[in-house]
């Protein structure tokens, strides 16, 4: 690391990136923070708001500056792979928003760049650090779900009015939010996928992508597991409010995502067979259903980051009015930042390092390939975990 103590981090892309700035600024192992954005007005406004002096409009200029140990990439998705590879080749550690890349070859490029650089890469997958995932994992580890038997992930979001680069985006190529919780829970990877496109994009929504589908649905098989994952994705022409979640079913209990996305989780616990039932007319074992607000566990966070798992206030450095910031994505942001910074400080692979990120991103790319081919089975490649 450069400097005398702590990690210096440049946050690249201040649309989504602003959500992470207060967390980096509060982290006890972060020495200094820079901001990077091509929009000069946004760069100035955000820099003034958080009192950040180091500002760049040119990504390459920041990478050439030895002051910065690490970058957090939050630029448009088509740029993720190029920005990550550039950072690693410049000798910077790299955190990157999902997905890792849009094509299989680009996944391998990032894996190779991490290995060659000796630096740390982490895909910042929010769903496996949110309070809901932590609750499901705790029930699974306690044996309360029993053996997993089924999984359904889903992400529905209407992107009309989003920036131009989102038009026609293949839904399955953003499947990590819907699929990664299962991979995190089982510790395995996807073996193959059969997927179909559903509906037809209107011409004005086609954009630059090779994608005719507003929605896609897929069935994913897991290596070394009998569980099959069902995933459904839509970005256009589906009349449904935003939702990004998953249902996990076991032979003793299940947890289902709230239908309104923001309510309590729905928990089902299987009950013993009722002995008094007659020999005929048996209706099977019953389940007891209850609603549970997933708790926030901050036991693995530095005290300075604990306030950011829930909504928090920002007191602008430029004297502007106090702002209320939402703790989006299940309060995952401080957990993600802490894991990335800890990996850098401790000199160890991040939890979602490049091979893991590639294994979690490739299934969606292969699912879209299957959908374009009318539902043919596509084998999902594996990625080497070798490290320098």
Image (spheres, rainbow, N blue to C red):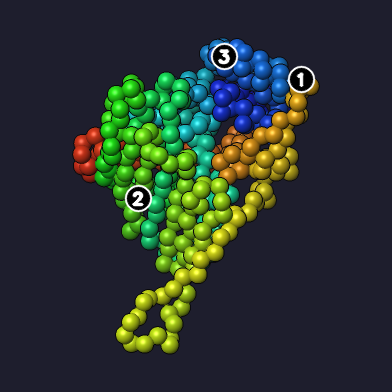
Q: Residue furthest right?
A: 319
Question: Compared to 320, does 311 lie above or below?
Answer: below
**Residue 221 in sight in this render:** yes
Which quadrant would residue 275 be assigned to in this image?
A: bottom left
Is 67 on the left-hand or right-hand side of 100? Answer: right
Question: Compared to 188, does 20 lie above or below?
Answer: above
Q: CA distance from mark 1 to mark 3?
A: 19 Å
In the rendered structure, find residue 318 and report the number of the disc placed on it: 1
Q: Which residue is identified by label 3?
A: 39
Q: Return the disc, 1 or 3, that comes first in the chain's sequence.
A: 3
In this rendered view, identify the residue nearer to me: 230 or 74. Answer: 230
Q: Return the disc, 3 or 2, that comes first in the chain's sequence.
A: 3
**Residue 223 in sight in this render:** no
Q: CA distance from mark 1 to mark 2?
A: 48 Å
Which quadrant of the rendered structure holds the N terminus? top right
In the rendered structure, find residue 230 and report the number of the disc placed on it: 2
Please tell me which residue is depicted at 76% across the width and 20% down the height of the picture: 318
Estimate the x, y position of residue 381 in percent, counting from the top left.
31, 39
Packing grade of label 1 (10 A; few <14, some 14-19, many >=20) is few
Packing grade of label 3 (10 A; few <14, some 14-19, many >=20) is few
Which quadrant would residue 358 be assigned to in this image?
A: top left
Estimate the x, y position of residue 287 in percent, counting from the top left.
46, 70
Question: Compared to 285, does 86 lie above or below?
Answer: above
* Helix, strand or loop under label 3: loop
In the rendered structure, find residue 281 and report the number of the disc placed on it: none
Packing grade of label 2 (10 A; few <14, some 14-19, many >=20) is many
């Amino acid at each position: 690391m450069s400097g005398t103590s702590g990690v210096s981090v440049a946050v690249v892309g201040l649309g989504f990136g602003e959500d992470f700035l207060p967390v980096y600024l509060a982290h006890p192992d972060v020495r200094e923070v820079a901001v990077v954005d091509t929009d000069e007005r946004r760069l100035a406004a955000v820099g003034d708001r958080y009192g950040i002096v180091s500002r760049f409009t040119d990504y390459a200029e920041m990478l050439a500056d030895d002051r910065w140990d690490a970058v957090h990439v939050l630029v448009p998705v088509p740029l993720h792979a190029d920005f990550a590879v550039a950072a690693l080749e410049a000798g910077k550690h790299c955190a990157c928003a999902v997905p890792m890349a849009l094509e299989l070859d680009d996944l391998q490029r990032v894996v190779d760049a991490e290995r060659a650089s000796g630096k740390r890469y982490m895909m910042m997958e929010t769903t496996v650090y949110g309070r809901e995932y932590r609750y499901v994992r705790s029930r699974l580890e306690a044996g309360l779900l029993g053996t997993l038997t089924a999984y359904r992930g889903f992400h529905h979001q209407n992107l009309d009015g989003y920036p131009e680069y989102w038009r026609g985006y293949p839904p399955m190529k953003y499947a990590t939010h819907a699929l990664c919780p299962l991979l995190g829970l089982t510790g395995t990877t996807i073996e193959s996928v059969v997927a179909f496109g559903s509906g037809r994009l209107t011409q004005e929504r086609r954009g630059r992508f090779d994608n005719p589908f507003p929605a896609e649905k897929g069935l994913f098989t897991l290596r070394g597991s009998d569980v099959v994952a069902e995933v459904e994705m839509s970005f256009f022409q589906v009349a449904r409010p935003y939702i990004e979640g998953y249902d996990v079913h076991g032979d003793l209990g299940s947890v289902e995502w709230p239908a309104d996305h923001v309510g309590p989780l729905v928990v089902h616990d299987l009950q013993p067979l009722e002995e008094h039932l007659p020999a005929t007319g048996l209706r099977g074992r019953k389940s007891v259903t209850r609603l549970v607000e997933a708790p926030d566990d901050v036991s693995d966070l530095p005290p300075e980051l604990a306030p950011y798992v829930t909504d928090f206030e920002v007191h602008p450095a430029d004297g502007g009015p106090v702002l209320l910031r939402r703790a989006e994505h299940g309060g995952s942001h401080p957990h993600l930042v802490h894991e990335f910074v800890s990996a850098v400080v401790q000199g160890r692979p991040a939890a979602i390092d490049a091979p893991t990120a590639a294994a979690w991103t490739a299934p969606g790319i292969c699912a879209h390939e299957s959908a374009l081919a009318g539902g043919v089975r596509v084998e999902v490649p594996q990625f080497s975990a070798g490290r320098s």
